[in-house]
């Protein structure tokens, strides 16, 4: 038997060089990066070795307009060249206009109020604090839920592997099976501050709430004087083909939530989070209760406005719905796919075998970026600006990707 004694080979590719430097300079929280990316355009990104990839993950449901969209680039560049950051001692037109736009899209132009943060977890953290202002502390969340990695958001996240290293977390949270109305009714009491639900559980693998579940949650919350808080961080900003997933007809009769949290696609790649309070929830956070240095700055709000305006002007809601239908039908056509879920461009599927990581790798080899949310679960959250040809190219490659991954 021979023993390898020579030093590890020096990396020869640019990607290898960055991988080595990454490992030597960044904390190992995400595992080794799969690619080193240098630029993007539309739904495509290019890696440091010059290869083009069709980005069907969109920065995890963030790049609604794809990469380097002219409207977003122009809005952000112009804003930064005019006024980038001012603190919340002051306000700016983009901040007020984005808040007004969100309230209009939610259908609450008069009874809602917005607080801007910088990320999803931060928006949820603000909402968590808002619920405490009811004078109650009990929260009911769902099994499979993901609400973020800060301690408050983590307290509402059910995954044991994420929680265990950081316990004790802020407390008094009951988890119930997602979609089970009876279990929800049994868990909510007159001590419950809020029910928090994702209309579509994204990180769980794109699990859509059964039709009528949100309406039932609304009734249960009302019976006990609790708030209904919908986490639309992944599902909102047009991704499902509706501005908010809870407005999508597939989820049943319309509900008016008390609290909605948003982030991801809202900024199209510029960090922003938002919490919208409706009715009494609009004024539970009082002067001094909460704050942020960066949240609501003109730069991030100009980005949010550019994203929402472009979706509106270019008819991208209808486009997201249509592209999603086509992708789901095409993916489901292969017998090695046992279930396809989702609405619009938030898509999850289950494979017949535990081959999801191999499918991600095979897709990447073939020039497509997708993501695994479990051993046999694949998620797609592509930009709304995909072309028909992009969808056709991916669907044509799909059976070969499953072959290569030996699904
Ligand atoms: C991504 C996500 C979060 C956390 O957002 P971050 O910006 O990563 O902090 C919270 N809730 C849901 C539903 C998410 O998908």
Image: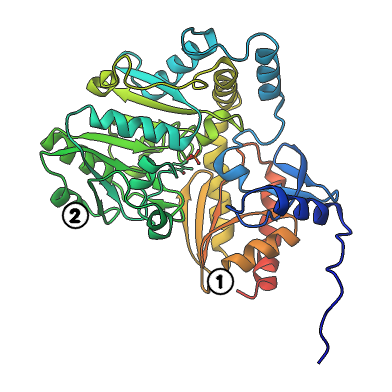
Q: Residue at x 56, y 71 (%)?
A: 336
Where residue 371 appears, as percent x and y from the top left, is 59, 55
Disc 1 target residue: 336
Q: Nearer the viewer, mark 1 or mark 2?
A: 2
Residue 218 appears in the rendering: yes
Where residue 128 appears, as percent x and y from the top left, is 31, 34
Taking 235 as reference, is 315 above or below it?
above
Taking 44 as reference, is 113 above or below it?
above
Assign a secondary structure to mark 2. helix
Residue found at the far bottom of this picture: 1
Q: Residue at x 66, y 41 (%)?
A: 386
Q: Residue at x 27, y 38 (%)?
A: 253
Looking at the image, residue 22 sits to the left or right of residue 167; the answer is: right
Where residue 306 appears, as percent x and y from the top left, is 60, 21
Looking at the image, residue 60 sits to the left or right of residue 22; the answer is: left
Taking 241 as reference, is 154 above or below it?
below
Q: Which mark is residue 183?
A: 2
Residue 258 appears in the rendering: no
């Amino acid at each position: 038997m021979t023993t390898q004694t020579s030093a590890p080979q020096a990396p020869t590719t640019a990607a290898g060089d960055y991988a080595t430097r990454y490992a030597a300079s960044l904390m190992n929280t995400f595992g080794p990066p799969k690619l080193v990316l240098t630029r993007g355009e539309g739904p495509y990104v290019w890696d440091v070795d010059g290869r083009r990839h069709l980005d069907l993950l969109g920065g995890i449901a963030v790049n609604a307009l794809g990469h380097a969209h002219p409207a977003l680039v122009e809005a952000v560049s112009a804003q930064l060249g005019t006024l980038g950051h001012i603190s919340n001692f002051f306000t700016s037109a983009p901040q007020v206009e984005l808040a007004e736009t969100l309230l209009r899209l939610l259908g609450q132009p008069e009874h809602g109020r917005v607080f801007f943060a910088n990320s999803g977890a931060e928006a949820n953290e603000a909402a968590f604090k808002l619920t405490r202002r009811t004078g109650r502390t009990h929260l009911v969340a769902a099994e499979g839920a993901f609400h973020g990695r800060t301690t408050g958001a983590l307290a509402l996240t059910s995954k044991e592997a994420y929680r265990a290293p950081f316990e004790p977390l802020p407390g008094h949270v009951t988890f119930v099976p997602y979609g089970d109305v009876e279990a929800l009714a049994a868990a909510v009491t007159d001590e419950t501050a809020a029910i928090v639900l994702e209309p579509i559980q994204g990180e769980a693998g794109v699990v859509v709430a059964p039709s009528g579940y949100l309406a039932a949650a609304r009734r249960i919350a009302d019976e006990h004087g609790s708030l209904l808080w919908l986490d639309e961080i992944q599902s909102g900003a047009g991704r499902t083909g509706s501005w908010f997933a809870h407005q999508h007809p597939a989820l049943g009769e319309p509900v008016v939530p008390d609290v909605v949290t948003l982030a991801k696609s809202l900024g199209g790649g510029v960090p922003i989070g938002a919490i919208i309070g409706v009715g009494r929830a609009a004024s539970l956070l009082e002067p001094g209760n909460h704050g942020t240095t960066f949240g609501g700055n003109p730069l991030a709000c100009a980005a949010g406005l550019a994203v929402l305006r472009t979706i509106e002007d270019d008819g991208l809601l209808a486009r997201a719905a249509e592209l999603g239908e086509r992708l789901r039908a095409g993916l489901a056509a292969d017998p090695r796919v046992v279930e396809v879920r989702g609405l619009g461009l938030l898509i999850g599927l289950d494979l017949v075998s535990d081959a999801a990581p191999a499918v991600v790798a095979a897709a990447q080899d073939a020039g497509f970026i997708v993501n695994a949310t479990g051993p046999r679960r694949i998620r797609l959250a592509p930009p709304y600006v995909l072309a028909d040809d992009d969808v056709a190219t991916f669907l044509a490659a799909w059976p070969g990707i499953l072959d290569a991954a030996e699904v």
